[in-house]
């Protein structure tokens, strides 16, 4: 009888341990699923952040290239005009806004330089800081 009781107790203990083990497995599975979901969210956020950063960098690079292109076009327009001493005029472009500086012989030459710059594609405004040599 004692053997039967021991056998029944052992069987019950095995059942309890098995149920406990199943619960532990379920808990572990839920924790793993939660961790996986958090990792997925973190990865998606990191990918989104990387895409935003790349887009912003590309836009800044595009602005720089665009400003450089505008500067080159303005300088070309100045050099092509016989009435302008293009070598004496500095051109800077920031976000499409052109700043002309330097020294020329006449106010008409300074004004023509500003008009030429304003006529270049992509120029939003022209600040004419060209000085007239007296």
Image (cartoon, rainbow, N blue to C red):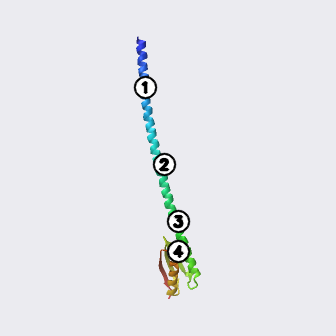
Quarter of the view holding residue 29:
top left
Residue wearing tag 2: 43
Q: Which mark is residue 121?
A: 4
Distance of mark 4 from mark 1, alpha carbons?
A: 80 Å
Among numbered discs 2 and 4, the one appearing first in the sequence: 2
Which residue has dot 1 on it? 17
- The residue mark sitting in front, 2 or 4, is 4
Q: Distance between the Cα atoms at labels 1 and 3?
A: 66 Å
Could you tell me if the residues under marks 1 and 3 are in contact, i.e. CB atoms within 8 Å? no
> Does the CB distance between marks 2 and 1 fall below 8 Å?
no
Mark earlier in primary sequence (4, 1): 1
Looking at the image, residue 82 lies above or below residue 72: below
**79 vs 132, nearest the viewer:** 79
Residue 69 lies, in percent from the top left, at 55, 71
Q: Which residue is under mark 3? A: 62
Mark 2 vs mark 1, CA separation in Å: 38 Å
Q: Residue at x 52, y 64 (%)?
A: 61
* Cα–Cα gap, marks 2 and 4: 43 Å
Question: For mark 1, does the 10 Å Cα neighbourhood hold few (<14), some (14 to 19), or many (20 or more) residues?
Answer: few
What's the distance in space between the residues labelled 3 and 4, CA to CA? Answer: 16 Å
Q: Classify 10 Å Cα crowding around label 4: few (below 14), some (14-19), many (20 and above).
A: few
Identify whether 58 is placed above or below 47: below
């Amino acid at each position: 009888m004692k053997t039967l009781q021991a056998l029944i107790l052992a069987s019950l203990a095995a059942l309890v341990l098995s149920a406990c083990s199943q619960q532990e497995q379920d808990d572990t599975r839920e924790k793993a699923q939660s961790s996986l979901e958090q990792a997925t969210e973190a990865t998606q956020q990191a990918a989104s952040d990387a895409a935003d950063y790349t887009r912003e960098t590309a836009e800044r690079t595009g602005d720089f290239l665009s400003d450089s292109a505008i500067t080159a076009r303005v300088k070309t327009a100045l050099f092509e005009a016989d009435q302008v001493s293009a070598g004496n005029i500095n051109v800077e472009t920031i976000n499409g806004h052109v700043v002309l500086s330097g020294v020329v012989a006449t106010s008409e030459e300074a004004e023509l330089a500003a008009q030429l710059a304003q006529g270049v594609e992509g120029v939003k405004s022209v600040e004419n800081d060209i000085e007239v040599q007296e």
